[in-house]
Amino acid sequence: MRLAETWHIGAAAATTGNEAIGSTTISPTSQAIPDNATGSVTLTFNVTQNISIEAAQLRLGFNHARAQDLQIVLTSPDGTVSTILHPIADGNSSVTGSGWRFVSQEFRGEMSAGVWTATIIDTVAGNVGSLLGNSSLVVFGASNTADDRYVYTNEYSAYGSADGRNLLADTDGGVDTINAAAVTTGSTINLNAGAASSIAGQALTIAAGSLFENADEVHRIGVEYGFSGILHKFVACVRLDDPTDDDELVRTQW
C-alpha cells in the first residue's frame, strides 16, 4: 500500500501503454533432439532492440513422446542462465505443436541487445522428439532506460552493508528516484552526492557524479503539508523519524 501511494513520483508509471517489446524469430527446419543427454540443440537469437528487460519469453514448437524428459535453458548476452523448463520424473505426457511459451524474469534489469541462446536437452533415454517450425524470443520491458527508480524496503536493514550495496551510483542521466515508502522505520535521505543518508537503520551514500532528482517516503506528506510535488527535485534532504506520524517531518535544504 505504501508503495502504491508513490507510483507517480519520478519516472512515468510502467503500463501496457508504454511497455517496450523486442523480438526476433529464427526458422529452423525440424531438428531432432538427441536422446539421453548425448547432445543438445542450441538456438541463437540476435536481439537488436536494446530495452531494459522485465521478462523474456521463448516461443517454441516441438513434438516429443515424453515432454517431462526435456530441459530448456535460456542464456542472455550478459551470461545470465535461466532454466525455463526442468525435467521431472513423474508423468508421461506427449506434446506436439507450436506456440509453447516459456517465460523467465531472471533477466530483469539487464539490457536486451545482443546474442541469446536457448539450449534444449533430452535428459532421459527411451523417448525421442524434435523441434518444429519457427522459434522466437520476445523481451518485454522499458525503453526509457535513463529514468530509474530505486526501491528500498525493510530488508535493506539486513543487506545494506553487504557487497557495496550502501553506495548508490547512477550516472546515465534521466529522472532518478530513491523510494523508501515501504520502510517502516525512520529514514534520512540526502540527494547530494557524497552526503550520508540512512534507510532502515543502514547507511546509504550517493556516489560522486550521480544525480538524483526525487526521494519519496509516503504520499500523504506532500498533501498534508501542501508541498508542490512531494519531495520533488527541489528537495535535497528529508527526514521522517516516525513514518506513522506526519508531525515528525523535518524538511531541510530546500
Image (spheres, rainbow, N blue to C red):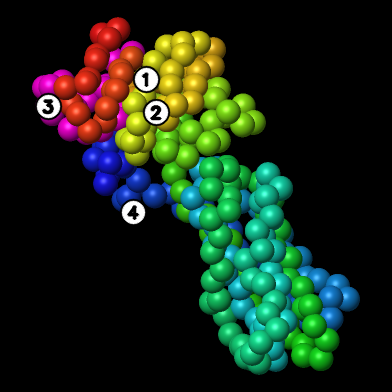
The residue that label 4 is drawn on is 16
Q: Nearer the viewer, mark 2 or mark 4?
A: 2
Q: Amino acid at mark 2?
A: Ile
Q: Nearer the viewer, mark 2 or mark 1?
A: 1
**Which disc, if any, is residue 188?**
1
Residue 144 x/y as whole percent: 43, 37
Secondary structure type for disc 4: loop
- Residue at the spot 27% in from the left edge and 27% down from the top edge: 242
**Which disc, if any, is residue 224?**
3
Residue 232 included in the magenta stretch of the image? yes
Residue 122 included in the magenta stretch of the image? no
Q: Earlier in the sequence, mark 1 or mark 4?
A: 4
Res. 127 image quadrant: bottom right
Residue range highlighted in magenta: 216-236
Q: CA distance from mark 2 to mark 1?
A: 11 Å
Q: Amino acid at mark 1?
A: Thr
Q: Amino acid at mark 3?
A: Glu
Q: Earlier in the sequence, mark 2 or mark 4?
A: 4
Q: Using the image as rendered, state which of residue 111 and residue 215 is in the foreground.
A: 215
Residue sitting farthest toward the right: 38
Q: Using the image as rendered, state which of residue 32 and residue 29 is in the foreground.
A: 32
Q: Using the image as rendered, state which of residue 20 and residue 40 is in the foreground.
A: 40
Res. 37 image quadrant: bottom right
Secondary structure type for disc 1: strand
Q: Nearer the viewer, mark 2 or mark 3?
A: 3
Q: Amino acid at mark 4?
A: Thr
Q: Main secondary structure of the magenta part?
A: loop
The residue that label 2 is drawn on is 178
Q: CA distance from mark 3 to mark 4?
A: 32 Å
